[in-house]
Image (cartoon, rainbow, N blue to C red):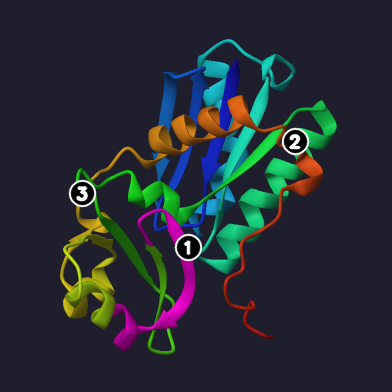
Amino acid sequence: MKILVFDTCLDKMYVTLADNEKILSSKIVTNKDNKYHSAFLISTIKSVLKENSLTPQDLDAIGTNIGPGSFTGIRACTTVARTMAQQLNLPAVGISSLEILERISKGKNTAVALDARKNCAYFLINGEIKGAIQLEEVEQILQNGDYTLITDDKLQQRLGGTSYQQEQYPLGDILAKLAYEKLKSNECKWQELKPLYIQPPPMG
């Protein structure tokens, strides 16, 4: 099963091609010349396919990060995933940023907290997404248990833990493996692929 996955929700863009669990190609793109990295999504997908002598018609499934994260990035990758899957009549699977980052941890009890602004964090603990909750509540939960925390640069200053932004973690590879796991056990219709807006998009 050839699976193309991509992520424009986090601080970098990841485009990865896998054959079942085997990673064939993985590219990371950062913001360039005042352009947000999602602007390079289509060209990067074309590049990855070309390098592997494949066309979109050779794909068996699409996977994408559905958020939380940048609203621009969430819209970009879910729209591209739905469009490709519809045109190619392929299954499409959505994976949360929190699920992806959880896989960085080697600990048994893992929490993930990402900055949600307004004194809140997008929070996952032991595999369960809790939503956007107040930082004081996050601190209390972390103090009451022995958790391995994965977070971002901003919240690391307050909560501690490990910031995913300080290392070159293979998040595209992790996304591909999660997509494969879900595709094996679920039907994953593209019609059901939707952005994960834990908070409403900003107005204006």
Q: Is residue 201 above or below residue 84?
A: below
Left or right relative to 134: residue 75: right
Where 179 falls versus 200 (above or below)? above
Q: Is residue 72 above or below residue 174?
A: below
Q: Mark 1: which amino acid?
A: Ile
Kindly identify the residue that appears in the image at 66 percent across and 33 percent down: 186
Q: Is residue 137 left or right of residue 21?
A: left
Q: What's the distance in space between the residues labelled 3 and 1, CA to CA?
A: 24 Å
Of labels 3 and 1, earlier in sequence is 1
The residue tagged 2 is 84
Q: Is residue 39 left or right of residue 145?
A: right
Mark 1 residue element: strand
**Residue that label 1 marks:** 129
Rounded to the nearest angstrom, the CA distance separating label 2 from label 3 is: 31 Å
Residue 113 visible at all = yes
Label 2 SS: helix
Magenta part of the chain = 125-138
Please tell me whether residue 50 is drawn above or below residue 169 in the rendered image: above
- The reply to whether discs 2 and 3 touch (Cβ–Cβ < 8 Å) is no
Which of the two discs, 2 and 1, labels the residue nearer the N terminus? 2
Query: For the point 67% across and 51% down, which residue is it?
Result: 78
Q: Amino acid at mark 2?
A: Met
Question: Toward which corner of the image does residue 62 lie, by quadrant?
Answer: top right
Location of residue 187 in the rendering, given as x and y in whole percent from the top left corner: 72, 32
Q: CA separation, marks 2 and 1?
A: 28 Å
Report the residue that reaches farthest toward the front. 144
In terms of secondary structure, where does tag 3 sit?
loop
Q: Position of residue 150 (x, y in %)?
A: 26, 59
Q: How many marks?
A: 3
